[in-house]
Image (cartoon, rainbow, N blue to C red):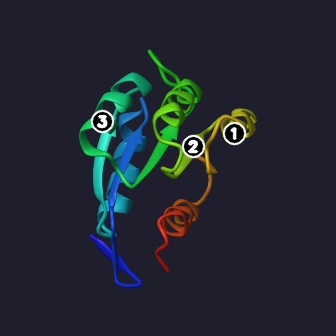
Amino acid sequence: MHVINNNIINNSILIADDDRLIRMVFREFLADRGFDIHEAENGKEALSLYAEVVPGLIITDINMPIMNGLDFILNLRSMDNSIPIIAASSDESVLEAALRNGANEVFPKMSDITNLIKSVNSLMGIN
């Protein structure tokens, strides 16, 4: 757990991405910074896992099989309107749609991974 202003925050992050390598890279960078990481291969699996772990933040790919990231975000927002969501995609044209559908921030996968860390820290209130 991280402590900010004497408050304990949920340091659990759910990563939803059908690319195992992307999940591994995100997991390693975030776990090295003290976050507890949970992984799902698609939006349907992520919804089930969300109910089990109730993470403090979600990072989701947009283009996934079974349930894509946009549908995942819409389903999640119908249950929880407050959880921070970062939508990630190598197809930058879909990131605007992710923002319109409830993502708090977007991350082009070809960006520097430190930008993802900055977004995670910002959304979770960590300096």
Measured in 3D between alpha carbons, the distance from the residue under mark 2 to the one under mark 1, in whole angstroms, is 7 Å
> What residue do we see at 30% from left, 36% from top?
51
Q: Are marks 2 and 1 in contact (CB under 8 Å)?
A: no
Q: How many marks?
A: 3
- The residue where tag 2 is placed is 88
Between residues 105 and 75, which one lies in front from this camera angle?
75
Left or right: 43 with respect to 11?
right
Give left or right: position of 119 versus 4: right
Q: Nearer the viewer, mark 2 or mark 3?
A: 3
What residue is disc 1 on? 95
Circle 1 sits in a helix, a strand or a loop, which is it? helix
Quadrant placement of the N terminus: bottom left
From the viewer's perspective, is residue 11 above or below residue 93? below
Determine whether 61 is above or below 1 in the image: above
Describe residue 34's horizontal placement relative to residue 74 as left or right.
left
Nearer-N-terminus badge (2/1)? 2
Amino acid type shown at disc 3:
Ala
Q: Residue 108: which numbered mark, if any? A: none
Mark 3 lies on residue = 51
